[in-house]
Image (spheres, grey):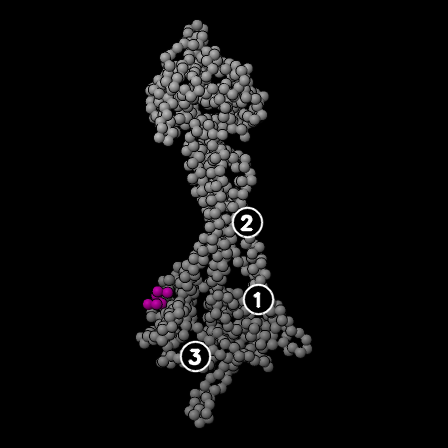
């Protein structure tokens, strides 16, 4: 018997008992609806995290630290790592940075460098942490997008990039980017001016840094204080950039950015953080951290291993991503398991419906055998009936899952908004999930049809024809 | 005349708990091409069982059924299905039509199992229904027809795949005498006009005598010594006479 005939017979049988078929199918619809909405939640959360990492190009980012500070150990919660010091550790100095830059697959290697300074614009000033970055990072996210202006073109230009936040502190309110905060101040009492970001480009600002006057250092003991004096450097605003927020962006969250060549000429105290002072051998160790960007995901691991062999600790976000993936797999599996239970309950409904149907149709099965139907034909008819329930139930279940996730997304975002969080899509239904759920539905339904189909095929025609 | 169908030492024993009930014992029989053979006997004599075994609906506990010299059990269950589909056509006492399907659909179903080309199925089903005089009842369901009409649908269904042998199990058992006569004439006509081999089971000896060339009697599952009851001429004689 051809498949088209089997399908027609199966379909006619399902239509004959409309209510029962509809109820059985409803079970599958609910099962698949539960399965896809649950898994799409897990997948959606994962997508939000990985998208953020991808958007910020963090897959290719590596952080290099001196091996005497076991950053990986500390990150993984091994407190003893903080106490361990390796005396033979290599020095993370300019020479090391240069060697990293020369490694195949490395596009960028620059030390993390920050120093405290006072930003002066006209009469107003504010304290800020200045971040030193090479012009080359401007090609990479999150530096390739600025609210206004441009990133540095050379490492030696006397430019600065400021954040709207620090500009506000020196009296400039930007008209567009501030709208989100919703605290619009106006009136005579406020000395802040609302200006457009573009109008600030080209304006000169002064960066005041503290230096220790070496010539007067000998007098320090006499005067009872360090001979600190301030030096001012004039810089031009070339860009305005929002501080990035979100996963993995902490090391790039700065209000004032200057190019590396220019920063080298700015006189300042020669330590970057309290960590430097904690080191036993003081300042000879070089940089605390060096940022390295690999050309592609494929290069990350070879670059990581190369730098490790140079004697440094390397933290690749790609490594952590693997751990993320594993955790999300567990989450997805658990969510999927709940949905699968619902589907299996539905499959019992299919078995029940089919067995009932066989009892009702025993005579008909006998007739079909008498006019030449083989066991295979009968089996296929029942199989296709079960499969059709699975296919139709699965397809409608996907629709149900879609509706449920859309509604849930609106409700959850409504509750997240007062917390000040941006609207996100918490659910994601990739093609593999849709096709997988549909196939799973058909597969489970066919499995549910195995026993009824075999039982129908075994019906003895002589017995069946005597059946009423 | 060559034997198209033959049974050799055919036996069937049913088991009811620990008790064995022999229904058919050592039945050997030959049916010639074009012959109309009637099997008569009382209720419980094993007539229907014999027909079911010949039709491949049931399997014997002893002996074999041969079609043109080939054992129908030799190719397993699939072979039996093929036998039911193409070699024989069944007509039952209680019609055994699918109530939810129209006359045309009931006949088409047999054609679908017989792997008749789908495009030609409706035409063929209509053709056989017309040939049994039901051209005006194609779209009616069995419940909307008289017993005689329903049995004609069953005959049409049995003829759909052009079988070698028509097996009729008490085809007039559920019909009044007038309608019985019509069905009997229909079967006789198929035998006379198309040379279709017919094997009919009935308990009505006069009916058998009217339509069959030869009649055999079953008694307690055994074939009684062959006796000539029928007045109809042999198919061979008939052919020679014509």
Mark 3 and mark 1 lie on one chain; the one further toward the N terminus is: 3
* Residue A177 tag number: none
Which is in the foreground here, disc 2 or disc 1?
Answer: 2
Q: Is residue A110 visible?
A: yes
Q: Which residue is mark 3?
A: A274
Crowd class of label 3 (few under 14; some 14 to 19; many from 20; radius 10 Å)? few
How far, Cα to Cα, is label 3 from label 2? 57 Å
| Rendered view: B239 above or below B180 | above
Mark 3 touching mark 1, by CB under 8 A?
no
Q: Which residues are magenta?
A: A304-309
Q: Chain of mark 2?
A: A
Q: What is the C-alpha distance between the residues marked 2 and 1?
A: 30 Å
Q: Tag 3, which secondary structure?
A: helix
Q: Answer with mark 3 or mark 2, whichever residue precedes in sequence.
A: 3
Which residue in the rendered view is the most extreme toward the top? Answer: B241
Q: Nearer the viewer, mark 3 or mark 1?
A: 1
Question: Which of A256/B99 is in front?
Answer: B99
Classified by dominant secondary structure, the portion drawn in magenta counts as: helix
Residue at 57% x, 66% y: name it.
Answer: A420
- Between disc 2 and disc 1, whose residue precedes? 2
Q: Chain of mark 3?
A: A
Mark 3 on the same chain as mark 2: yes
> Pointer 1: what residue?
A420
Residue at numbered disc 2: A400
């Amino acid at each position: 018997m051809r498949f088209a005939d089997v399908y027609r017979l199966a379909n006619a049988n399902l239509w004959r008992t409309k209510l029962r078929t509809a109820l059985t199918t409803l079970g599958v619809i609910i099962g698949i609806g539960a399965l896809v909405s649950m898994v799409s939640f897990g997948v959606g959360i994962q997508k939000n995290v990985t998208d953020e990492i991808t958007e910020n190009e963090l897959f290719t980012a590596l952080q290099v630290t001196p091996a005497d500070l076991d950053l990986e150990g500390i990150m993984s919660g091994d407190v003893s790592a903080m106490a361990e010091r390796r005396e033979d550790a290599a020095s993370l100095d300019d020479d090391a940075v240069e060697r990293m830059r020369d490694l195949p697959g490395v596009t960028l290697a620059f030390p993390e460098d920050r120093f405290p300074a006072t930003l002066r614009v006209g009469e107003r000033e504010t304290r800020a942490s200045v971040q030193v970055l090479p012009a080359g990072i401007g090609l990479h996210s999150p530096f390739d997008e600025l609210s206004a202006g441009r990133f540095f073109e050379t490492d030696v230009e006397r430019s600065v990039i400021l954040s709207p936040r620090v500009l506000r502190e020196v009296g400039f309110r930007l008209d567009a980017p501030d709208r989100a905060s919703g605290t619009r101040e106006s009136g005579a009492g406020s000395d802040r001016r609302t200006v457009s970001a573009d109008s600030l480009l080209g304006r000169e600002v002064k960066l005041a840094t503290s230096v220790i006057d070496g010539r007067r250092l000998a007098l320090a003991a006499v005067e009872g204080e360090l001979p600190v004096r301030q030096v001012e450097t004039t810089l031009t605003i070339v860009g305005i950039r929002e501080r990035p927020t979100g996963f993995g962006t902490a090391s790039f969250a700065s209000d004032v950015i200057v190019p590396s060549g220019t920063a080298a000429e700015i006189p300042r105290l020669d330590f970057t953080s309290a960590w430097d002072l904690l080191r036993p051998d003081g300042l000879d160790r070089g940089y605390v951290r060096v940022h390295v960007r690999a050309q592609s995901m494929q290069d990350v691991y070879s670059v990581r291993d190369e730098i490790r062999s140079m004697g440094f600790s390397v933290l690749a976000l790609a490594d952590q991503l693997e751990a993320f993936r594993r955790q999300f797999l567990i989450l997805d599996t658990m969510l999927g398991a709940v949905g699968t239970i619902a589907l299996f309950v539905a499959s019992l409904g299919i078995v029940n419906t089919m067995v009932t149907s066989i009892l009702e149709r025993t005579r008909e099965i006998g007739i079909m055998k008498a006019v030449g139907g083989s066991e295979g034909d009968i089996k296929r008819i029942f199989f296709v009936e079960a499969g059709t329930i699975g296919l139709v139930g699965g397809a409608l279940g996907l629709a149900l899952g879609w509706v449920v996730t859309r509604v849930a997304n609106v409700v959850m975002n409504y509750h997240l908004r007062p917390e000040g969080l941006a609207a996100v899509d918490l659910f994601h239904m990739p093609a593999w999930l849709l096709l997988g759920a549909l196939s799973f539905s058909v597969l489970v339904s066919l499995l549910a049809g195995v026993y009824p189909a075999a039982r129908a095929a075994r019906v003895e025609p002589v017995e069946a024809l005597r059946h009423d | 005349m060559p034997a198209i169908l033959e049974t050799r030492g055919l036996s069937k024993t049913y088991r009811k708990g620990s008790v064995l009930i022999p229904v058919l014992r050592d039945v050997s029989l030959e049916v010639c091409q074009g012959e109309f053979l009637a099997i008569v006997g009382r209720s419980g004599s094993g007539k229907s069982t014999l027909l079911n075994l010949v039709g491949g609906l049931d399997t014997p506990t002893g002996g074999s059924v041969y079609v043109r010299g080939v054992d129908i059990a030799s190719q397993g269950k699939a072979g039996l299905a093929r036998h039911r589909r193409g070699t024989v056509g069944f007509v039952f006492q209680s019609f055994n039509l699918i109530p939810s399907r129209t006359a045309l659909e009931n006949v088409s179903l047999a054609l679908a199992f017989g792997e008749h080309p789908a495009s030609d199925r409706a035409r063929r089903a209509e053709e056989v229904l017309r040939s049994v005089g039901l051209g005006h009842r194609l779209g009616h369901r069995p419940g909307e027809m008289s017993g005689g009409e329903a049995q004609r649908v069953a005959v049409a269904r049995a003829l759909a795949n052009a079988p070698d042998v028509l097996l009729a199990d008490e085809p007039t058992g559920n019909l009044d005498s007038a309608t019985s006569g019509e069905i009997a004439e229909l079967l006789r006509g198929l035998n006379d006009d198309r040379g279709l081999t017919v094997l009919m089971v009935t308990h009505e000896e006069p009916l058998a005598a009217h339509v069959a060339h030869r009649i055999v009697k079953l008694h307690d599952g055994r074939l009684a010594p062959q006796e000539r009851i029928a007045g109809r001429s042999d198919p061979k004689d008939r052919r020679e006479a014509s």
